[in-house]
């Protein structure tokens, strides 16, 4: 009887092996489908993007004939700008968000906290600024992320390096700048933004301003970072990329279209060289004025870049425009209001002062160099 039992046991092992093999093959089918679907969509995206200009020109010409306006008139130039830039920016935004959504699946907030906790402050400032470019952050998540960092031993200055870099040097801004202005402007923006984040965070850390955190922050006990998360499968990472497109693009597209509409108005109706009168190199006060104008505004990178493009086209200086863009994104009034829940007014004032000084320096330096 024993040999029979052994034979049954062997057969049982064979059946288990076949079952595992079948499960593995079934698990590979969704991945293959996702990869195939993503490849087809990518090819379609590339075809549309490379043929966008002639299609936009054709649509604008047809619309001009129907509506009866001149293509070279103010309205014609504005509409032409809007019809071309809207799909261009939204297509770039969709591709970037999808790709970075996959990248972000490797950098959860918990993993980011674990990387930053316990690091030397100078090293932490560099790591925090770099991590800020690829991790999810916006004004609405400022308070929980700030609390999570502070209560798990991340130095205050390192935390600020992250808070500055995340909204200002994000992937959307960099790729859209590259797509609209080329690698030089994108590299300038990225380098100066990271430098501001690192230096400002280091400066705030040297000032030892922990006492200006709200008192209730210190009453929160530092929680455990938790157990190591199970690694995601590639199917899940691709899904996260798709969810990021749905969530982010679904939320920001009205701001993008509003920004493009403002840019179209500037492009069509503002005379050539007009912006140079108060945003050009010759006006020394143009940089601080642009920063003061930008702070009360609320926009993200995708919404402000079309306006930046139109301002540059009308004679505004590069440094002045970069300072304006950085102030809108990094020093927005709504973000300050939310951070007030955690920071006392003295620390908020120092934060604005240090970051604002860095932005002013960027504006003046690049107005001098370009």
Image: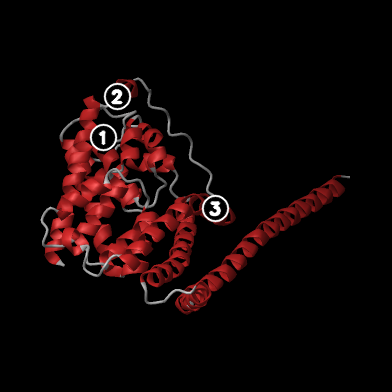
- Specify the color scheme: secondary structure
Disc 3: CA contacts within 10 A as few (<14), some (14-19) or many (>=20):
some
Q: Is residue 37 left or right of residue 99?
A: right
Disc 1: CA contacts within 10 A as few (<14), some (14-19) or many (>=20):
many
**Which residue is label 2 attached to?**
214
The location of residue 254, given as percent across then percent down, is: 47, 53
The quadrant of the rendering that contains the N terminus is top right
Q: Residue at x 26, y 35 (%)?
A: 155
Please identify, in this view, whether the residue under mark 1 or under mark 2 is nearer the observer.
Answer: 2
The local secondary structure at tag 1 comes to helix
Please identify, in this view, whether the residue under mark 1 or under mark 3 is nearer the observer.
Answer: 3
Answer whether labels 1 and 2 touch (C-beta < 8 Å).
no
**Which residue is label 3 attached to?**
246
Q: Residue at x 28, y 54 (%)?
A: 325
Query: Looking at the image, which is closer to me, 304 or 157?
Result: 304
Q: Which mark, residue 156?
A: 1
Q: Residue at x 21, y 68 (%)?
A: 273
The tag earlier along the polypeptide, 3 or 2, is: 2
The local secondary structure at tag 3 comes to helix
- Disc 1 and disc 2: Cα gap in Å? 13 Å
Q: Quadrant of residue 295?
A: top left
The tag earlier along the polypeptide, 1 or 2, is: 1
- Disc 1 and disc 3: Cα gap in Å? 34 Å
Q: Is residue 222 above or below residue 124?
A: above
Query: Looking at the image, which is closer to me, 159 or 138?
Result: 138
Q: Residue at x 22, y 65 (%)?
A: 274
Query: Looking at the image, which is closer to me, 182 or 283?
Result: 283
* Residue at the extreme right of the image, as rendered: 1
């Amino acid at each position: 009887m024993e040999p029979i039992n052994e034979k049954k046991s062997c057969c049982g092992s064979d059946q288990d092996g076949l079952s595992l093999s079948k499960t593995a093959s079934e698990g590979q089918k969704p991945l293959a489908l996702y990869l195939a679907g993503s490849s087809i969509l990518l090819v379609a995206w590339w075809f549309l993007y490379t043929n966008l200009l002639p299609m936009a020109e054709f649509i604008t010409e047809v619309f001009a004939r129907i509506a009866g306006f001149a293509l070279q008139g103010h309205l014609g130039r504005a509409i032409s700008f809007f019809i071309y830039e809207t799909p261009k920016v939204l297509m770039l935004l969709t591709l970037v968000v999808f790709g970075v959504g996959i990248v972000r699946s490797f950098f959860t907030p918990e993993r980011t906290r674990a990387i930053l906790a316990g690091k030397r402050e100078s090293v932490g400032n560099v790591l925090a600024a770099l991590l800020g470019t690829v991790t999810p952050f916006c004004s609405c998540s400022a308070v929980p992320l700030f609390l999570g960092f502070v209560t798990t031993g991340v130095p205050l200055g390192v935390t600020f390096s992250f808070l500055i870099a995340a909204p200002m040097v994000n992937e959307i801004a960099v790729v859209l700048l590259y797509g609209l202005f080329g690698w030089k402007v994108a590299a300038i923006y990225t380098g100066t933004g990271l430098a501001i984040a690192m230096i400002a965070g280091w400066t705030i850390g040297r000032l030892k301003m922990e006492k200006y955190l709200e008192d209730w922050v210190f009453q929160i006990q530092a929680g455990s970072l938790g157990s190591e998360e199970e690694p995601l499968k590639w199917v899940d990472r691709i899904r996260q990329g798709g969810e990021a497109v749905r969530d982010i693009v679904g939320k920001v597209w009205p701001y993008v279209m509003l920004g493009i509409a403002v840019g179209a108005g500037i492009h069509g109706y503002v005379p050539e060289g007009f912006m140079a009168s108060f945003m050009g190199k010759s006006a020394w006060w143009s940089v601080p004025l642009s920063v003061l104008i930008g702070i009360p505004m609320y926009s993200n990178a995708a919404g402000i870049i079309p306006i930046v493009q139109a301002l540059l086209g009308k004679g505004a200086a590069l440094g002045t425009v970069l300072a304006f863009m950085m102030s809108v994104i990094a020093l927005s009034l709504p973000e300050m209001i939310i951070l007030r829940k955690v920071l006392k007014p003295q620390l908020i004032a120092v934060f604005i002062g240090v970051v604002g000084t860095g932005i002013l320096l960027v504006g003046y330096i690049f107005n001098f160099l370009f």
